[in-house]
Image: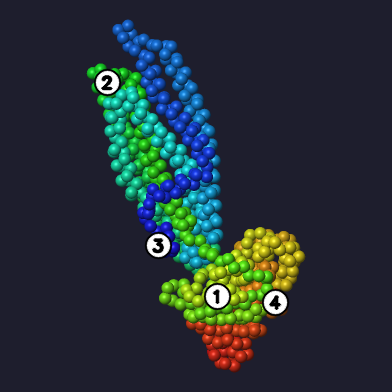
Amino acid sequence: MRPENMGERSAPRNAFKTMKRMFGYFRESRALIIGMLVLLSASTLLNLLIPDLIGRAVDTLSISSNGLRVDWQGLVNILLVLLGVFVFSSLFSYFQGRIAAKLTRSTTLTIKRNVSEKLIRLPVGFFDSHRSGDMLARLTNDIENISNLISQAVGTVISSVIVIVGCVVIMLIKNPVLTLVCLSTVILNVLCTVFLSKKMFGYFRSQQKSVGEMNSHVEQSIAAKKTIDSYNITDDCVAENERLSDELMNSSIKAQVLGGAMSPLMSIIGNLNFLLIVAVGALLFINGGFGVTIGTIQAFTLYSRQFTKPINELSGIFSQLMTALSSAERVFEILDTPSEEDEGRRILPGSEPCSVSFEHVTFSYVRGVKVLDDFSLTIEKGQRVALVGRTGAGKTTLISLLMRFYEPDSGRILLDGVDIREIPKAELRSRVTTVLQSTAIIGGTVRENIAYGRFSATERELEEAAKITCADEFINRLENGMDTEISQDDTQLSQGQRQLLCMARASVTKPGVLILDEALSSVDSATEAQIQSALLNIMSGRTCVIIAHRLSTIKDADKIAVFDNGKIAETGTHEELLKKHGVYYRLYKNQYVGK
């Protein structure tokens, strides 16, 4: 199954396996499970005594030629026992409910923690092919469905099993014939449940998929609100929203109709069972067979209700079970996705600038479509190398391979002569810092945003990082300076100021290799000129890789490598490349001289 098709199946691979795995999370709460089972069993067993006690109470009344005779002592004793049963059953049920709530909370938190940790450890390529809205739906809506099953259905299932088994045993002891009558409709119950369940699962799976698509669309619409208004496509977005809403509504209605039909159908079968018991019991009483009394018939009608009630409840929660199984499969698909592999054990000594070598690297996002083709390039320690070329030439891909966001199809990448696959990813990424074109601002203070690069940085180091990148000028103008609260959607910072913060964050990491991936694209020309000298300070003593479309930002690079069709077309300094009248010359001419 390809990752991008995740969650699109209409039927489960193995519903039993999914259920077993889902309830496997209870292993961490054995004490709670045992306590809940003991209290639930005690409460249920006490409730099983009620029909028999009521039947015995009825039999204390008898009618003879002398009129109605009542065994008052026996009736009072039975009523006192009934009162005790009601009180203790209620107490056991109350404490069992509290334990169940605690079990639900702990189990749900465990699943959420596992999924959250898994998402953090998944490779970047996973998120390239999966919408964040769908991932959010799995982390919230799907886990909530599992939580509802645990909190509402688990106790019902356990109680129902105890009631069904207990009723059968007690009824067999009291009267085998009436027991067979009571069990006669069970087969009909099972057939209806199996038939409807097969139909329901596909609809509930489709419903959960529609929830994920709807969440993704809403999230994208909010994030791209300015773009939507700018291109005047509000009506199109509304139409798409309505289409997704209709799909969700249709799948939900079909799922709920089938789920809702289960309980009434079981109720009809239960009433049929009630009529059969009364009819057969009356015939046996009239003929004096099998020791049937009025109290026996009364007890069996109540046992019939007790027996069919859990079956009806199990049928009624079947839709909830189907929803939870659908959600559990979607959650487990995330947990089963292979995490980022990291077999590296080699630790590089010291924190000096590193050399970088690409040796015959070939890479394709899509099989057969090469982005890099037998690419080779060497960057010496402390050297500033600029990568230029048309959009889509593979410049940013090269950096993603260096950071091991992806693995090359062939070839290798060396850091200080060591294959990066031999270096732990944490070690590698601590040596290589990237300032991206997109600004990654986190919710928090300005200080926290800069320290995000290295949490152990001192206050002095944070201030120096802000100063060296010229970010201190606008930070000092903020109302609370470094303590000013900002967020990704905050309008008090311009795009250029956000970029400066990201540069300050990179500076505080003190990397061996610094990568500027279109880092100045959001900075105006005046600001660009202002921070050029600051950038020289940042790059001093480090190996630097600069990716830029604006060729004015790379004139002072030690070497410029020009990309063309996934390979290096030419290398040299700015002046050398202009003299060659090659690819770089054409790029420069188009950008500054005109065609």
Which quarter of the figure is the N terminus placed in? bottom left
Mark 3 crowd level (few <14, some 14–19, many ≥20, 10 Å Cα): few
Mark 4: amino acid:
Gly
Examine the rendered structure and indicate whether residue 308 appears above or below residue 517: above
Q: Element under label 3?
A: loop
From the image, tell me which residue sits under label 2. 290
Measure how far apart labels 1 and 4 are at the Cα level.
Answer: 22 Å
Mark 2 crowd level (few <14, some 14–19, many ≥20, 10 Å Cα): some
Residue at 49%, 80% (x, y): give it.
374
Of the two numbered discs 4 and 3 in the rendering, the one whose residue sits closer to the viewer: 4
Residue at 38%, 30% (x, y): give it.
166
Image mark count:
4
Residue at 52%, 45% (x, y): give it.
28
From the image, tell me which residue sits under label 1. 413
Measure how far apart labels 3 and 2 are at the Cα level.
Answer: 62 Å
Measure how far apart labels 2 and 4 are at the Cα level.
Answer: 101 Å
**In the rendered image, is residue 399 in sight?**
no
Q: Earlier in the sequence, mark 2 or mark 4?
A: 2
Mark 4 crowd level (few <14, some 14–19, many ≥20, 10 Å Cα): some
Measure how far apart labels 1 and 3 are at the Cα level.
Answer: 30 Å
Q: Earlier in the sequence, mark 4 or mark 3?
A: 3
Of the two numbered discs 1 and 2 in the rendering, the one whose residue sits closer to the viewer: 1
Tag 4 and tag 3, C-beta contact below 8 Å:
no
Q: Earlier in the sequence, mark 1 or mark 4?
A: 1
Measure how far apart labels 1 and 2 are at the Cα level.
Answer: 88 Å
Residue at 40%, 21% (x, y): give it.
53
Q: Element under label 2?
A: loop
Q: Position of residue 495 (x, y in %)?
A: 63, 70
From the image, tell me which residue sits under label 3. 1
Mark 1: amino acid:
Ile
From the image, tell me which residue sits under label 4. 541
Examine the rendered structure and indicate whether residue 413 appears above or below residue 580: above
